[in-house]
Image (spheres, grey):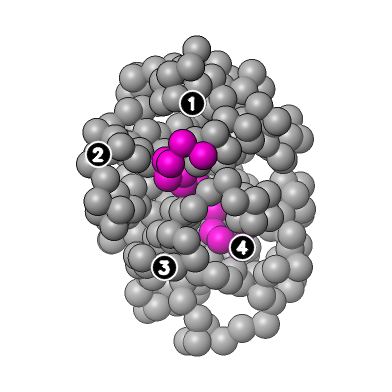
Amino acid sequence: MSKAVFFDIDGTLINIHNNQTRMSTAVRSAIHDLRAAGHHTFIATGRPWAYLSPELTESGLFDGFIVMNGAAVLLEGKVIYQKPLPMETVKQIIAIAEQHQIEYILEGYPKVYLKEEYKGLEEVYRAIDIDIDRFVRDYTLDKISVSKMEFLCDTAGANGVFKQLLGWPGLTGLIDPTLLKYMELYAADISKGTGILEALRYLDIPTVDSYAFGDGLNDIEMMETAGHSLVMGNAGRELKARAEHVLPTVDEDGVAEGINRYILKRL
């Protein structure tokens, strides 16, 4: 029976903190073998479509994508689920960000929108090998769709503004725990877990035949939803507590180990 396998990107398939922006040969080979065995493979990421590299979108290794933490789900090039934020909410949050000189990027499918003058965010994305030429710089707010927002400030927590935005009705998100200068916001009723359920429903695959690989806090719902949770060795304690299996780290090709041992069962 076909299974559905969902992979986080950062800290799972690649390690941007170690300047590893491409999957290792062992990981690519294991995912290829999953596809060859008739299983469905998905990227499940907080990133929008525009941040995904050609290695992920054009290699034939993945037939589905859950992007923006579940705000959009794609299968074989077709959008099977999408949830934008209310535009009035987006406008109100933008007004607060601009009042406090906080840079922001607006993410939708398939485009993302970043003002030309926001050089701080531009450098963040350059540093993790994202092609900023794909960003739309000149746009009219009322003519676009926004499912997720990201913010960058100069001071920790933006002097309380990040906390204010995280408490916005109907929204949820994450603040970078290290420097507290980066935050993302999206609808409170979506997650990688809801994206998985949409994909499984569409494919008519039972939850028990689904597998999730991840390492971060935005993978918690994914681990709680999938039938089998495989957590990277570089993950924190909170996620490891939800693991059916703890794998080697991303630098040790933990994804390849998990595929071969627990799904293809050839180790």
Of callouts 4 and 3, the N-terminal one: 4
Is residue 58 placed above or below 267 in the rendered structure?
below
10 Å crowding of disc 4: few (<14), some (14-19), many (20+): many
What mark, if any, has residue 207 been given in the picture? 2
Label 3 vs label 1: CA separation?
Answer: 27 Å
Is residue 139 placed above or below 155 in the rendered structure?
below
Label 4 vs label 3: CA separation?
Answer: 15 Å
Of callouts 1 and 4, the N-terminal one: 4
User: Do the residues bearing badges 2 and 4 touch, measured as CB atoms within 8 Å?
Assistant: no
What range of the chain is rendered magenta?
A: 36-51
Of callouts 3 and 1, the N-terminal one: 3
Q: Nearer the viewer, residue 93 or 124?
A: 124
Query: What element does badge 2 sit on?
Result: helix
Label 1 vs label 4: CA separation?
Answer: 27 Å
| Residue 120 visible somewhere in the drawing | no
Q: Nearer the viewer, residue 223 or 101?
A: 223
Residue 48 within the segment the image draws in magenta = yes
What residue is disc 4 on? 50
In front: mark 2 or mark 4? 2
10 Å crowding of disc 2: few (<14), some (14-19), many (20+): some
- Amino acid at circle 3: Val
Query: What element does badge 1 sit on?
Result: helix
10 Å crowding of disc 3: few (<14), some (14-19), many (20+): some
